[in-house]
Amino acid sequence: MGGSAAKVVFTLLVTLAIIIPCLEAGIAEYDDFLKNQAEEAHTIALESYVPTPEFVASELNYHVHLAMQNSTRRGLRAPRNPAFGPCDSTNPIDNCWRCNKDWANDRYQLAKCGKGFGRRAVGGLGGPIYVVNDTSDDDMQNPKPGTIRHAVTQQGPLWITFSRSMRITLQQELMISSDKTIDGRGANVQFKDGGGLTMQFVNNIIIHGIRVKNIVPKDGGMIRDSYNHVGHRTRSDGDAISIFGASNIWIDHVSLSNSADGLIDVIEGSTAITVSNCHMTRHNDVMLFGASDTNPHVNDKLMQITVAFNHFGQGLSQRMPRCRFGFFHVLNNDYTHWQIYAIGGSSKPTILSQGNRFIAPNLDFAKEITHRDYATPEQWMQWQWQSDMDLLMNGATFNTTGAPIQMTYKKGLIMKPRDGTHVSRLTRHAGALNCYAGFPC
Ligand SMILES: *[C@@H]1O[C@H](CO)[C@@H](O)[C@H](O)[C@H]1NC(C)=O
Ligand SMILES: *[C@@H]1O[C@H](CO)[C@@H](O)[C@H](O)[C@H]1NC(C)=O
Ligand SMILES: *[C@@H]1O[C@H](CO)[C@@H](O)[C@H](O)[C@H]1NC(C)=O
């Protein structure tokens, strides 16, 4: 190939590399505002990435250990919740706030409870409380005060709560801007039958205590994505929650089910993420962490995600999660249902599975927990996929590969995970909680 021809091909490849992610991004017009936002988001991702993810993993194990000790000691003296009796929070995230009967006057306490890679997410901490009191979603560009779309596009930190139980049907995907907490405690808040929740090129968000189901694709159009910007969006896929080039995101106690695309997709160089205490049901492709194996997506090497204390329940099929490139700590989750496989991946992800309970389905071909794509055995044998103190039931098998993951511990922090027999206690209250003001949740 002559020099100039090679140059043309190269230019074409570079152009494609820039255009393809934009199409997937749902961005119809990549204006200066968005380019700038994407660059800033990438800088934050680089800063949020930790060079020793094993340390974050072992620190979380240490906190599980402390919290279980704590809850045993507290025992029956615990304050009571009218629905559940004594507060029996056992995992270190819940233990930090759930037994506080004054939670409704002390909502910001939650911001200090994050653990794992998303631990630095404090959301709207320090900002005002915003009460959503209007379920409508009629104006995508200038949303009405009192609506969720108005709330999430305000400037600066904001702690968003709900005046009462409500069902919100989003007319388009909801573009959540940085430094927000969506806090559904005290109400039954359902995002249902409409667009999903999107976090694109943003930082520092907590989503807690809501229910998201039956999310469907939406056509797109002009949609406000922040206080200063309205963007032209293409069609959305119908992910319940989509995290795109975003960092420091914590999803906790969210119930998710039955949506058109993924329940939680984390893609395009997102990092510093925790998915905890969620309850997922009735869905095929549950969680996608990294969307592509090809070059424009190598940013996904930055991806570091904690998946802890979740219940993967009825009617789920596969991808809990399905991973590419990054480091994934899958700790103390309850896998009670899958149809094809539980944990999968391609492009050499590192997966540390610890203290989970895996109950295989009654299908002979689906006993194996793991699934590897697009690689020869010689290649995937090198990927570090390790199982440590998992509880394997009903014939479940976990095909471990690669070298053991070297745990680097802080002095005095040599902590094994709690084994899978503790999982039903640790995940008993997964999903959105019924919280009443004046009582522990
Ligand atoms: C133990 O429980 C108390 C009160 O419920 C809580 O404030 C504290 O943070 C807990 N400690 C740990 C290590 O979880
Ligand atoms: C709803 O909330 C908005 C924004 O805070 C406020 O302006 C409005 O007065 C509230 N409406 C009602 C009926 O409380
Ligand atoms: C498990 O891994 C071995 C190689 O280590 C491979 O030969 C075998 O087919 C795998 N089994 C399953 C069920 O994936």
Image: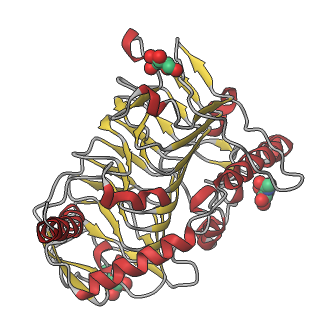
Q: Position of residue 231 (x, y in %)?
A: 19, 79
Say which residue appears at 47% left-offset and 56% top-offset.
301
Residue 281, compared with residue 30, is above or below; it is above
Q: Residue at x 11, y 67 (%)?
A: 5
Above or below, comparing residue 206 to residue 324 in the picture:
below
Drawn side of residue 191 relative to residue 386, left or right: left
Residue 267: x %, y % from top left? 36, 57
- Left or right: residue 34 versus residue 301 is left
Q: Would you say 231 lies left or right of 422 here?
A: left
258 over 372 or under it: above or below: below
Which percent across, then down, holds residue 323? Answer: 43, 44
Is any part of residue 122 visible from this angle? no
Residue at image coords 83%, 43%: 69
Q: Which residue is pictured at 39% across the width and 58% down the height?
A: 298
Residue closest to the eye, 9 or 75: 9
Please determine whether, in this image, residue 265 is positioned above or below residue 137: above
Residue 351 visible in image: yes
Which colouring convention does the figure follow? Answer: secondary structure
For the N terminus, give its image quadrant. Answer: bottom left
Ligand 2 is found in the corner quadrant, namely bottom left
Residue 411 percent location from the top left of the image: 88, 55
Return the residue found at the far right. 412
Quadrant in which residue 419 is drawn:
top right
Residue at the bottom extreme of this rendering: 228
In this rendered view, identify the residue nearer to me: 436 or 255.
255
